[in-house]
Image (cartoon, helix red, strand yellow):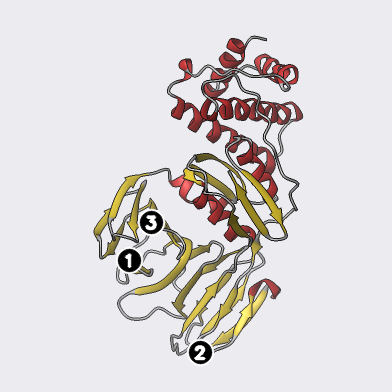
Amino acid sequence: MTNDRINALIAKYFDGTLTEAERVELNQSYDLQSDQDIEWMADSLGEAGQVKQRMLSNIGQEIFSKKVHRIDHSHYRFIYAAAVLLLVAMAWLFFKPFSKPVIAAKQAQMTKIKPGGNKAILRLGTGGQIVLDHVAPGKIVEMDGVRVLKTKEGQVVFTVVAGAGVAAQLSSISTPKGGQYEVVLPDGTKVWLNSASSIQFPTAFTGTERKVSLEGEAYFEVAKNKAMPFKVKTSLQEIEVLGTHFNIMAYDNENSIKTTLVEGSVKVSSKGGRALLKPGQQAELNKINNHLSIQEVSTRDAIAWKSGIFMFAHEDIRSILNKISRWYDVEVIYKNTASANRYSGSISRFEDVTEVLKTMEMTGTVHFEIKGRRIYVMD
């Protein structure tokens, strides 16, 4: 099959017009050409950057889908074939643009490191603490008119006992590296904590506002209460809402704090200014100069972690490896200056870490070596 024909079939794959017969044809072309040089013609599909973004986005989504949903065997095989074809083509187009390529990513022998899971520690206002992943479903504790319950789904739910006198105390839930957890606060607000994160909150909300403090990353679905605005405080900013869905990424080792609005509206306040966000917007606070900027973003990308997906949209390698380090509880060591290339794509967070690294190695721009729980990065 000619390269022009391959490109035509891949274009139809993007458009969603690929017939079953053409799927088989594309699959067979992979069998015939997997060990040969593949030439990729971008002209008919748009500019190089656009093609790259579309390829990796589609590949990631389909590969993830086949890992979590049951699909027929022929489609399963096609996804692998198309993914390999497109990744090899992409690697040539964007990193070897002026010579006929032979892509053979050199991959180190990698130690398997398993992904994280539901792990968290509850610290009570009275001074005690509970390792939540060691607790069986059922009532955990009742104190000062507040009942703390772990459900069979793994949530931790705080509820005020009817008729009981409530003396609100500050409690916190924190996840380690390699941990995540879902919490239902006393007002019914749902919070999903990402790895290496913590939230501090009162065991009962009283007064004129509901205020919590966050370190790390969390996704909020805030229960509506017009009489008591909900506020989230981070190290450098405060977010105020009445009832909405949004994500905050505020890790200490990141250069910025990102607040992404999915539904409703939020007001972001910081030394760098104030902003009222609309759905689909993200406020980014630069920690170095306190500049607050607003941009339109894909909310799907920002909250993909909540659904068990790593989603990278034109990210630099240090940002990507920060996420990997937190989720897999590994140390990352750079043997050379980190690659200036940016990467886009997605893969399940429940893959072995080697699968994530191998996908990046296929670009031919970076290589990894794992020793124990350390990942060494080499250009």
Task: Name the front one of labels 2 and 3.
Answer: 3
- Answer left or right for 292 relative to 23: left
CB atoms of marks 1 and 2 within 8 Å: no
Q: Secondary structure at mark 1?
A: strand
Identity of the residue furthest to the front in this view:
336
Mark 1 vs 2, N-terminal side: 2
Query: Where is residue 42 drawn, in percent x and y?
Result: 49, 19
Q: Residues within 10 Å of mark 2 (few under 14, many from 20)?
A: some
Visible residue check, residue 277: no
Q: Which residue is mark 2?
A: 144
- The amino acid marked with disc number 2 is Asp
Residue type, mark 1 in image = Gln
- The answer to whether any part of residue 284 appears in the image is yes
Q: Which residue is mark 3?
A: 259
Whole-percent x and y of residue 286?
33, 57
> Alpha-carbon neighbours of circle 3 within 10 Å: few (<14), some, or many (≥20)?
many
Residue designated by label 1: 237
